[in-house]
Image (tube, coloured by chain):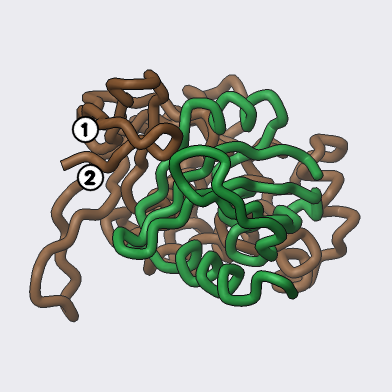
Amino acid sequence: MSDPCPICGGATRAEVLPEYADDLLGLPVVLRGAVVRETCTVCGETVTEIPDLDGLTAALAVTRALYPLQLTGAELRFLRKATGMNARDFADAIDLDTASLSRWENDKQTLGGYAEKVIRVFVCEVLHDQAPAIPYTAGMIPRLKLRPHGSMPPFRPVMDRVRFRLEREDTARLRWEAEPVAA
Amino acid sequence: MPYHDETRRIHALARDPATRWKWTGHAEARMRERDISRLDVRTVLQRGAVVRVEQPRFEVTWNVRGRDGDGRPLEIVVVARDDALFVTVITAWEA
C-alpha cells in the first residue's frame, strides 16, 4: 500500500519503475526494477523512493573505484562524499593535504596513478562491507591498470537489487549489484 | 537548541539504514538547479539542526539547517513519519 501524499494527503498510485536514470547521487546511474514512483491522484505531485540509499551509495562507489578509467574531479568528490567525510577528514585519513584534494576535485590538477590507487583502496575499505554483492578484495586495486579518458567507455553503471546472503546471516537480503561492464 | 528532540529524531532517521528515503519531484527539481546531491541532503540531515517546525499544509514539516560535505550551508524541509521511519524531502536551498 502506498503512503498518502506528503503535500495534500491525497491517495497515491505507486508503480515500480523498470528503469530509472538517476542524476542526483553525484554519479549517473541506471537503477532497474527497484525505484518506486508514487503519484498523487489529487494534486499530481510525484514522490520517488530509492530503496537502501546507503547500500546503493556504497555499491556505486565501490563499483566506480574498481572501474579502471581515471577518475574525474566530480567522481573523486562523489567517492569522498560516499564515505561521509568532509574534505579535511578525508585528506587527513590518507595523509594528504587538503589543498591537493581540492585541486583534484576541481579538475585544476590531475591525479597521479599512485595517489588515485590509494584513494580507491581507501574508499573500498571504508565502504565494501555495505556493498557485499560487489565482488572486492584488497588486492584488486593495486593490480588495476588505470586507463586515460577516451580509451574505454565512460562509467555508466546499471544497478539491480539481488538477494544476497552473507555467511554470518541466516537469511538473504536485498542488496545492490552492478551489471558487469566490459573494461 | 530549540528543537532538541526533533533534531535527535532526524539524526536517528538519517543514520538508520532502514529509513525509507522519499524525494518529491519539486525537491529533485530544486536540487538539480542548485547542484545539490542526495548525499549532500543526507549529510545535512545527519548532522544539521531542526530550526523550524510548522504545518503549512497536510503534514508537519521540519526545517533542518546544516552544512553539506563541502561546507556549503543548506536548509532542507522534510516530513518525518515516525511510524514508517522515512523522510520525505520537500525542498532544499542554499541558506
The front one of A69 and A6 is: A6
The front one of B45 and A174 is: B45
Q: Residue A42's image quarter?
A: top left
Tell me which chain appears green. Answer: B
Q: Position of residue B50 (x, y in %)?
A: 66, 62
Name the residue rendered at 80%, 50% in the picture. B73
Q: Is residue A62 above or below residue B56?
A: below
Does residue A80 appear in the picture of this structure?
Answer: no
Q: Residue B58's image quarter?
A: top left
Q: Position of residue B39 (x, y in %)?
A: 57, 49
What is the three-letter code of the residue carrying label 2? Answer: Arg
Q: Is residue B67 above or below residue A125?
A: above
Name the quadrant of the N terminus of chain A.
top left
The front one of A92 and A117 is: A92
Q: Which residue is mark 2?
A: A161
Name the residue rendered at 73%, 61% in the picture. A86
How far is mark 1 from mark 2, CA to CA?
Answer: 8 Å
Image check: A88 left or right of A130? right
Q: Which residue is mark 1?
A: A33
Tell me which chain appears brown. Answer: A
